[in-house]
C-alpha cells in the first residue's frame, strides 16, 4: 500500500521520505552557514588588535612583515623588486608610486619600527621612518590570501 496513484514502478519517493530529505538538506545548509559565520568572526578577531598605552595601535600579525618586505623590495634589482612587490601590494600600486618617492625608497632603508594607526578592521596606516630622515605612509588592507595577510594599497611621503 502506497501513497502513489500509478503502478508501484512509477511512484517514486513517498511523501514522508521526501519531507525527510528536504529537512536534512535544510539542516545541512544551516550548519554550513553557521560554521562559515564562526570562521569569519575568527578572522575578524585576529585582524583586530587592541590599542597600546602610547596612543598608537598595536600592529596586527603580519603587517610589520608586509611593510618590511615592501620597503626592502626597493633596494633590490628591478626584476626581483617587482616579484616582491607583487606579493605585498594590491595590483598596480607599484606603478602609481611617484618617481621622487621611488627614488627615495631605492636609496634608503627602514630606520626603526613603523607606527600603526587602525583605520578600521580591514585597514591600517603605517608610518615608516627611513634612514635619510624622511617618513613614508603606507596604507595596508587586510587580505586573507596574502602571504602576510596584509597588502600595501598606497604609499606616500609624510
Image: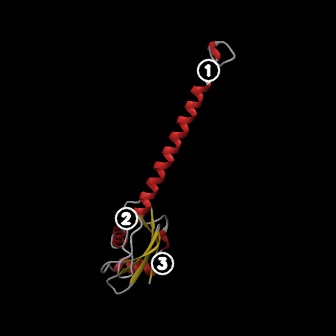
- Residue for point 47% across, 75% down: 97
Identify the residue shown where x is 45% and y is 64%: 142
Q: Give the number of the disc on residue 12.
A: 1
Mark positioned earlier in the residue sequence (3 or 1): 1
Give the mark, 1 or 2, whose residue is nearer the N terminus.
Answer: 1
Q: Nearer the viewer, mark 1 or mark 2?
A: 1
Element on which disc 1 rests: loop
Q: Nearer the viewer, residue 80 or 13?
A: 13
Seen at 49% across and 64% down, the residue is: 91
**CA–CA distance between discs 3 and 1?**
70 Å
**Where does the image place residue 125, in percent across and percent down from the top left?**
44, 75
Which quadrant of the figure contains the C terminus? Answer: bottom left
Calculate the distance from the C-alpha at mark 3 to the C-alpha at mark 2. Answer: 18 Å
According to the image, label 2 marks what residue? 84
Q: State the image coordinates of residue 129 (x, y, percent, origin top left).
A: 35, 82
Q: Give the spatial CA distance, label 1 vs label 2.
A: 60 Å
Which residue is disc 3 drawn over? Answer: 98
> Please, is residue 49 above or below residue 41 in the view?
below
| Mark 3 nearby-residue class (10 Å; few <14, some 14–19, many ≥20) | few
Residue at image point 62% right, 16% down = 2
Amino acid at each position: 500500500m502506497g501513497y502513489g496513484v500509478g503502478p508501484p514502478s512509477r511512484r517514486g519517493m513517498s511523501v514522508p521520505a521526501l519531507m525527510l530529505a528536504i529537512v536534512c538538506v535544510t539542516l545541512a545548509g544551516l550548519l554550513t552557514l553557521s560554521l562559515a559565520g564562526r570562521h569569519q568572526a575568527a578572522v575578524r578577531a585576529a585582524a583586530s588588535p587592541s590599542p597600546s598605552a602610547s596612543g598608537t595601535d598595536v600592529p596586527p600579525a603580519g603587517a610589520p612583515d608586509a611593510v618590511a618586505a615592501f620597503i626592502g623590495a626597493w633596494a633590490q634589482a628591478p626584476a626581483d623588486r617587482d616579484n616582491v612587490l607583487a606579493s605585498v601590494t594590491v595590483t598596480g600600486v607599484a606603478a602609481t608610486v611617484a618617481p621622487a618617492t621611488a627614488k627615495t625608497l631605492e636609496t634608503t632603508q627602514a630606520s626603526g619600527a613603523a607606527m600603526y594607526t587602525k583605520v578600521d578592521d580591514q585597514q591600517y596606516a603605517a608610518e615608516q621612518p627611513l634612514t635619510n630622515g624622511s617618513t613614508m605612509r603606507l596604507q595596508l588592507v587586510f587580505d586573507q590570501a596574502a602571504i602576510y595577510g596584509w597588502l600595501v594599497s598606497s604609499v606616500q611621503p609624510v
